[in-house]
Amino acid sequence: MPPRLKLVLQYTVIILITVLLIWFSLKGLTVSEGENKWDYILRTWKIADKGWLMLMLGFAIMSHIIRAIRWKMLLSSTGNQVKLSNSFLSLMVGYLVNLVIPRGGEVSRCYNLYKLNKVPVDVSFGTVVVERVVDLICLALLIILAFVLESKKLFAFVETLPIQLSGSSKIKTILYLGVVGLVSLVLLYILLSRNKKIKATLSKIWQGVKTGLLSVFRLKQKGLFIFYSLFIWFLYFFMSFCVIKAFPATEHLGFSAVISLFGIGSIAMAAPLPGGTGSYHVLVPQGLSFLYAIQLKDAVALTFIFHGWQTFIMIIAGSVSLIITTLLVRKS
């Protein structure tokens, strides 16, 4: 199959899944006869406390700045000194691309940084992988905390999801995927190693990626790096807290409820869909409804507004960053 056709099919499937999940989410929004579902969402937006939503905007921008500082620290440990402004611009361009191409932002922000600072893409990509590993650890800690605080409710919610497997089935599935993945890697290595030119290119790329991966061990201020990593997720939590407090239907929820929903939302956002669109709109309303008895129509409306507001921030910040990058590159 031609690569271009394969790419088109891949994104067609992603778009179809996204649309299907949004349709499934909207299906749960039952309104009065003659009432439009989008009108109900708009009315929910109108009664929301805009002060809390603007506070969420402040936390979002602050989290992006801290993430840019953390990335700058990793890049500095590889011997590449970059301006904080360039790190921030590249990060926001990456977020913008992620809204269109799932996980495409990880590469695009590295390429954007190369245009601004001439940092090798393979090296910066290695630092991005380090970031993702650290974020995965933080997410795992968050989920553990959520289950400690709301274990009964969350285990009951997990049982309702249509992904249940028996213990033996889980082990067989993991072993099967592991064997298939290992065999695929071996075959790919054998195939590529026969071509000396490809082998030399891959070896060069790997050296750059390895430099980025090892950057975390060369950090001069490891404690500060850990603090920034935790602080980013602390800000993410307060973004969710602000949104929960912004709506009359959920403003009564406490700390443990917010952290549980934040954990569910983070897992939904990690799905390989543009900006978590679809998966977020299905899981979060179900969590609100099942765990805390929020009417499903209110939960769906709240989720659409939260995700829409968050996406709007990324589109504006990402577009401005892309324009500034283009102007800086032309000037230089």
Image (tube, rainbow, N blue to C red):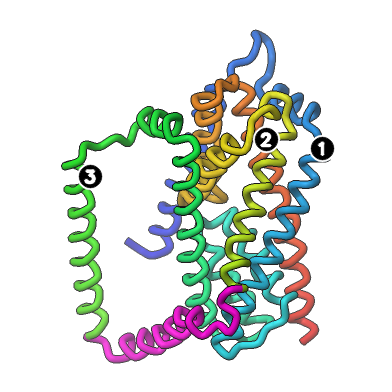
- Nearer to the camera, 215 or 7: 215
Q: On residue 290, which mark appears?
A: none
Asked if the residues shown at circle 3 and circle 2 are in contact, with their CB atoms under 8 angstroms apart, the answer is no
Instruction: Identify the residue position indicated by label 2 in the image.
Output: 244
Query: Which quadrant of the structure image shows residue 108?
Result: bottom right
Q: Residues within 10 Å of mark 1 (few under 14, many from 20)?
A: some
Query: Which quadrant of the structure image shows residue 77?
Result: bottom right
Q: Residues within 10 Å of mark 3 (few under 14, many from 20)?
A: few
Residue 105: give x, y in percent of width and height: 56, 64
Q: Is residue 217 magenta?
A: yes
Dominant secondary-structure state across the stretch colored magenta: helix
Residue 23 visible here: no
Q: Amino acid at mark 1?
A: Lys
**Magenta stretch in the rendered image:** 194-223
Please tell me whether mark 2 sits on a helix, a strand or a loop.
helix
Please tell me whether mark 1 sits on a helix, a strand or a loop.
helix
Q: Amino acid at mark 3?
A: Lys
Question: Which residue does the image show at 74% across and 74% down from the upper left?
Answer: 326
Q: Is residue 219 magenta?
A: yes
- Relative height, residue 320 to residue 13 (above, below): below
Residue 21: give x, y in percent of width and height: 49, 35
Instruction: Please tell me which of labels 3 and 1 falls first in the chain.
Output: 1
Q: Is residue 226 left or right of residue 320?
A: left
- 3D distance between C-alphas at marks 3 and 2: 35 Å
- Relative height, residue 121 to residue 233 (above, below): below
Question: Which residue does the image show at 68% across and 66% down from the upper left?
Answer: 66
- Front label number (2 vs 1): 2
Instruction: Identify the residue position indicated by label 1 in the image.
Output: 50
Instruction: Please tell me which of labels 2 and 1 falls first in the chain.
Output: 1
Instruction: Please tell me which of labels 3 and 2 falls first in the chain.
Output: 3
